Amino acid sequence: MSETAATVRRLARRLGGQSQVAEMLEVHRSSVSRWLRASDVPDAENKAKLEALDFVYRRLLQTFEVETARKWLTGINAHLGNRRPIDLLAKNRVAEVVAAIEQAEAGSYA
């Protein structure tokens, strides 16, 4: 299994399925299916989004339970200017999302 397929499989398992991964990455479900079968590889932009989602989700699991981490990704976050972390990840703004995780870990309120 390719590294990309393993990442997609892990995220699909943790985030509730391939459809959720596709929605979070803002790609068509068929793209995620092809990446999972390793019959196709994501372009550079989608590979970066996939890796960012995987990194951030793993980081969230260091602090939160699985369901809380999933909700954190898709919920409005005051530390991010009342934006959703997943929307910033789609724009490759990983550092801002990681900073918000660190603020949540520190118990900081916005």
Image (cartoon, grey):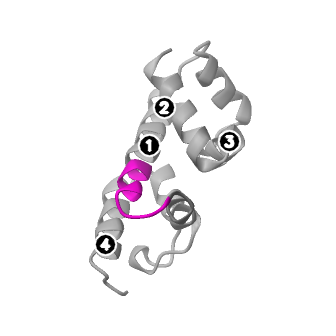
Which range of residues does the magenta coloring cover? Answer: 56-65
Q: Mark 2 sits on what residue?
A: 7
Are the residues flagged by discs 1 and 3 in contact, CB closer than 8 Å? no
The label on residue 54 is 1
> Is residue 71 toward the left or the right of residue 3 in the image?
right
Above or below 45: residue 81: below
Q: Disc 3 and disc 2: Cα gap in Å?
A: 13 Å
How many numbered marks are there? 4
Mark positioned earlier in the residue sequence (3 or 2): 2
SS at badge 2:
helix
Q: Mark 3 sits on what residue?
A: 17
Mark positioned earlier in the residue sequence (1 or 3): 3
**Front tag of 1 and 4:** 4
Task: Tell me where residue 54 appears, x and y as whole percent.
Answer: 44, 43
Q: What type of secondary structure mainly makes up the magenta span?
A: helix
> Is residue 86 toward the left or the right of residue 59 in the image?
right
Q: Disc 3 and disc 4: Cα gap in Å?
A: 27 Å
Residue 62 painted magenta = yes
Are the residues flagged by discs 2 and 4 in contact, CB closer than 8 Å? no
> Is residue 95 toward the left or the right of residue 3 in the image?
left
> Mark 4: few, some, or many residues within 10 Å (few <14, many ≥20)?
few
Q: Which residue sits furthest bottom?
A: 109
Above or below 3: residue 76: below
Q: Residue at x 48, y 63 (%)?
A: 85
Residue in the foreground of this view, choosing between 35 and 89:
35
Q: Disc 1 and disc 3: Cα gap in Å?
A: 14 Å
Location of residue 44 by image quarter: top left
SS at badge 3:
loop
